[in-house]
Image (cartoon, coloured by chain):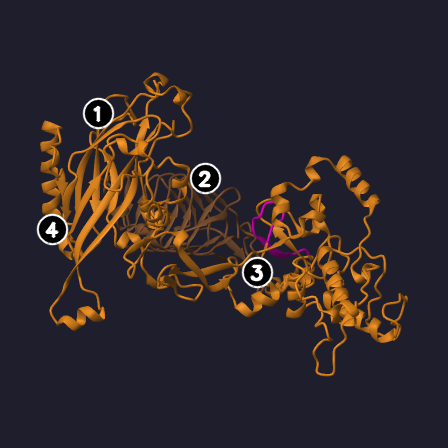
Chain colours: A brown, B orange
């Protein structure tokens, strides 16, 4: 995923145009799909190594299973779309993060949470496991709940192009 | 102290459209006109209690292209486009909303303890042996909270199937006893009225012949919903009996209680009008009240209250439901302890379109599909009104303002329009409120360039940056902004300097005796009201008059004026 362009800066730039802090921990990189213009800040932990016990048909059996050697399991891919900002010291265990999502500092995104497009997660939020956050929501609290809506005019502001350009190895 | 981020709020003019027009004609109290004031001699006071309701960040505002006016959430009408469940993201048709209510009727539930989402999981023994992974786990199933580890087993509820939890849950009480559904109750009622020729005489066991017929107890304890259903059914039958239907299908002579005739009679009750005709007087239908649980009567049970108290005493605080938990429940009045709480079905969410209240044009309309985030129409203020950003001119580490030390701020106006705009800004000489800081705008009039092609920007960027840098270097040399001159200028933005002389927060600077007192919340923030007037020449829009005049581009002069509030910083409390 990461192209090692040997720059000695704070951020690694990937081929698809993401900036990932060198001080972040990304586990199970093969299962993580990053879009473009995503910024991941320092001391973020992203887990792509979550496993799902293979259960046919059962609805969202959201129990992550410990490594069971010999048993057939699948890694659950973590997809992070475009223009996603992940603030420092946040822990991401989500199943999907849509585009134009901004996650604040010190957040925890629980296992298999799904965050749709245009969502703001305020600082210090704990998004519980299996939660689905619909588009245009503002989430805060422990456990996280939708506390507000994104106004129509804020959509442009969630474009990370400027932030992306501003951040980096400068 | 937490760091202060400068902010800009825009005032929506909808709040004062009524007041000033009415006031203009009136004679003004002479005391206020002594000061040198602007043409309509009112300066906006951001600290006025009413201002709270008219100030919005620019992003929250819309712009009506027909009224040429800013629209805030208070002066738009919301219309629901789609209902959907925020958890399963399924669209709910509006017909279902009317019949089923505003909660998700699939399997989406929130934990009654912590409101985190619940997931269904099996508590049956996991299948073992070869190929066990492919076997569907068997029931029973419970709802589980992965956040606080609550489980519906705690309230004695289990499910047979992993889907359709809502329907299953509506059939069981906490503890596992089944709820008699409204349908069954209705069946019971029908049976009863058919069996007994005398209106409702209580007879136990009228329904031996019914195969799955539930025998309802006369002294049954009803929950709120079934009590309401019973009461409603009872009174409906009473009304029907009191005014029997005539041959034409209409209810009898006095039109019953639910008819417009009855309404007008009630309206005339106290005025003694002639609505109360003799007919209705002559025939007074005798109506009785509910007598038992089947008719919706619930006797006040003193022992249950005592039970609640002893339970509270024995189980203590941990088992008592909090106000926040009860608030999420339906019929919270009947619930006291944690065991009474039920999983909360997700409240549906809506996608809404917005209309201008004055001209009814649509200002924003999202796509009706739940999963899409596009808008069909989106007239938002940031694409019509120059945004204002604030930045201290001298980059100081100290984010508090020192009293009596002139501090300069850079206001950057960014023009989103494709035409160049003329901006004039005005501020009162001192900020309103008890602590008056002095404010000077060094350049009150300027022009901001058009928001031309983005490519042009990209091409020009290199050169521009250089220009900016030279400017910055130059500024370091002098650090003195010139009056009447723009500080910095870009393709579609202009920066001007505003000088603020913060006042001291000590009480002795206050002139009036009655103003003295400790600094109240946020009184140390310097908030500058700014009146912004934007003028530009827009291309004539496709109005009929414009088209009629000729094919040539007709330039139309536009003007927009509004108040803003700039929060620049906190004054240090020495």
In the picture, the quarter occupied by the C terminus of chain A is: top left
Q: Residue B477's x, y, as percent?
A: 9, 28
Q: In this rendering, which labeled residue sits more in front, label 1 or label 3?
A: 1
| Label 4 chain ID | B
Q: Is residue B114 left or right of residue A81?
A: right
Q: Are marks 2 and 3 on the same chain?
A: no
**What range of the chain is rendered magenta?**
B110-123
Which residue is under mark 1?
B406
Q: Residue B352's x, y, as percent?
A: 43, 60
| Label 3 chain ID | B
Q: Are marks 4 and 3 on the same chain?
A: yes
Label 4 CA crowd tier, 10 Å (few <14, some 14–19, many 20+): few
Q: Is residue B137 in view from this perspective?
A: no
Residues at marks 2 and 3 touching, judged by CB atoms closer than 8 Å: no
Rounded to the nearest angstrom, the CA distance separating label 2 from label 4 is 41 Å
Instruction: Pick whichever of labels 1 and 3 is earlier in the sequence.
Output: 3
Where B82 sits versus B504, above or below? below
Which residue is under mark 3?
B102
State which quadrant residue B272 falls in.
bottom right
Q: Are marks 1 and 3 on the same chain?
A: yes
Instruction: Pick whichever of labels 1 and 4 is earlier in the sequence.
Output: 1
Disc sitting over residue B460 in the figure? 4
Q: Is residue A65 left or right of residue A134?
A: right
Q: Residue furthest top?
A: B508
Residue B386 drawn in magenta: no
Disc 3 secondary structure class: loop
Residue nearest the observer in this picture, A7 or B205: B205
């Amino acid at each position: 995923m990461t192209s090692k362009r040997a720059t000695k800066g704070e951020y690694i730039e990937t081929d698809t145009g993401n900036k990932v802090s060198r001080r972040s921990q990304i586990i199970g990189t093969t299962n993580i799909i990053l879009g473009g213009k995503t910024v991941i800040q320092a001391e973020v932990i992203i887990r792509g190594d979550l496993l799902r016990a293979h259960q046919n048909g059962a609805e969202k059996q959201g129990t992550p299973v410990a490594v069971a050697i010999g048993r057939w399991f699948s890694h659950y891919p973590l997809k992070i779309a475009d223009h996603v900002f992940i603030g420092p010291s946040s822990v991401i265990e989500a199943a999907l993060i849509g585009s134009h999502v901004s996650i604040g500092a010190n957040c925890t995104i629980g296992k298999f949470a799904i965050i749709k497009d245009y969502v703001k997660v305020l600082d210090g939020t704990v998004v519980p496991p299996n939660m689905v956050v619909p588009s245009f929501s503002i989430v805060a609290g422990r456990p996280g709940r939708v506390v507000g809506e994104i106004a129509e005019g804020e959509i442009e502001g969630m474009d990370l192009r400027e932030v992306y350009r501003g951040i980096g190895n400068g | 102290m937490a760091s202060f981020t400068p902010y800009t709020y825009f005032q929506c003019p909808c709040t004062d459209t009524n007041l000033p027009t009415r006031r203009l004609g009136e004679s003004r109290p002479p005391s206020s006109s002594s000061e040198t004031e602007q043409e309509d001699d009112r300066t906006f006071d951001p600290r006025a209690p009413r201002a709270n309701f008219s100030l919005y960040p620019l992003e929250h505002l819309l712009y009506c292209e027909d009224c040429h006016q800013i629209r805030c959430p208070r002066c738009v009408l919301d219309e629901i486009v789609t209902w959907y469940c925020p958890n399963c993201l399924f669209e709910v048709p509006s017909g279902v909303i009317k019949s089923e209510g505003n909660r998700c009727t699939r399997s989406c539930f929130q934990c009654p303890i912590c409101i985190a989402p619940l997931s269904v999981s099996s508590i049956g023994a996991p299948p073992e042996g070869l190929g066990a992974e492919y076997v569907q786990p068997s029931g029973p199933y419970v709802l589980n909270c992965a956040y606080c580890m609550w489980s519906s087993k705690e309230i004695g509820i289990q499910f047979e199937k992993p889907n359709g939890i809502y329907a299953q849950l509506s059939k069981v009480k906490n503890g596992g006893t089944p709820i008699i559904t409204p349908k069954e109750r209705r069946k019971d009622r029908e049976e009863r009225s058919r069996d007994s020729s005398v209106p409702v005489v209580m007879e136990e066991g009228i329904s031996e012949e019914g195969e799955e017929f539930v025998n309802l107890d006369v002294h049954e304890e009803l929950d709120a919903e079934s009590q309401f259903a019973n009461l409603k059914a009872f009174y409906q039958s009473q009304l029907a009996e009191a005014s029997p239907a005539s041959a034409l299908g209409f209810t009898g002579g006095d039109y019953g209680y639910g008819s417009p005739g009855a309404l007008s009679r009630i309206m005339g009750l106290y005025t003694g009008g002639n609505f109360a005709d003799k007919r209705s007087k002559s025939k007074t239908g005798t109506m009785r009240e509910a007598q038992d649980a089947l008719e919706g009567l619930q006797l006040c049970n003193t022992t249950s209250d005592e039970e609640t108290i002893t339970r509270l005493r024995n189980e203590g605080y941990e088992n008592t439901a909090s106000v926040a938990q009860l608030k999420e429940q339906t019929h919270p009045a009947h619930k006291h302890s944690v065991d009474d709480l039920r999983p909360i079905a997700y409240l549906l969410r809506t996608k809404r379109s917005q209309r201008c209240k004055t001209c009814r044009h649509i200002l924003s309309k999202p796509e009706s599909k739940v999963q899409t985030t596009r808008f069909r129409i989106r007239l938002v203020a940031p694409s019509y009104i120059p945004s204002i950003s604030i930045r201290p001119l001298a980059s100081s580490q100290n984010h508090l303002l020192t009293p009596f030390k002139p501090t300069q701020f850079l206001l950057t106006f960014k023009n989103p329009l494709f035409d160049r705009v003329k901006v004039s800004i005005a501020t009162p000489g001192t900020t309103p409120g008890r602590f008056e800081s002095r404010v000077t705008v060094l350049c009150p009039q300027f022009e901001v360039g058009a928001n031309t092609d983005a490519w042009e920007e990209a091409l020009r960027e290199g050169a521009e940056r250089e220009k900016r840098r030279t400017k910055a270097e130059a500024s370091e040399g002098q650090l003195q902004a010139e009056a009447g001159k723009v500080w910095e200028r870009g393709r579609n933005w202009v920066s001007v300097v505003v000088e603020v002389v913060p006042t001291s927060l000590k009480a002795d600077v206050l002139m009036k005796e009655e103003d003295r007192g400790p600094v109240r919340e946020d009184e140390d923030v310097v908030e500058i009201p700014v009146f912004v007037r934007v003028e530009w020449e827009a291309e004539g829009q496709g109005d009929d008059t414009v088209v009629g005049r000729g094919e040539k581009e007709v330039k139309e002069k536009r003007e927009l004026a509004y108040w803003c509030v700039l929060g620049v910083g906190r004054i240090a409390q020495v």
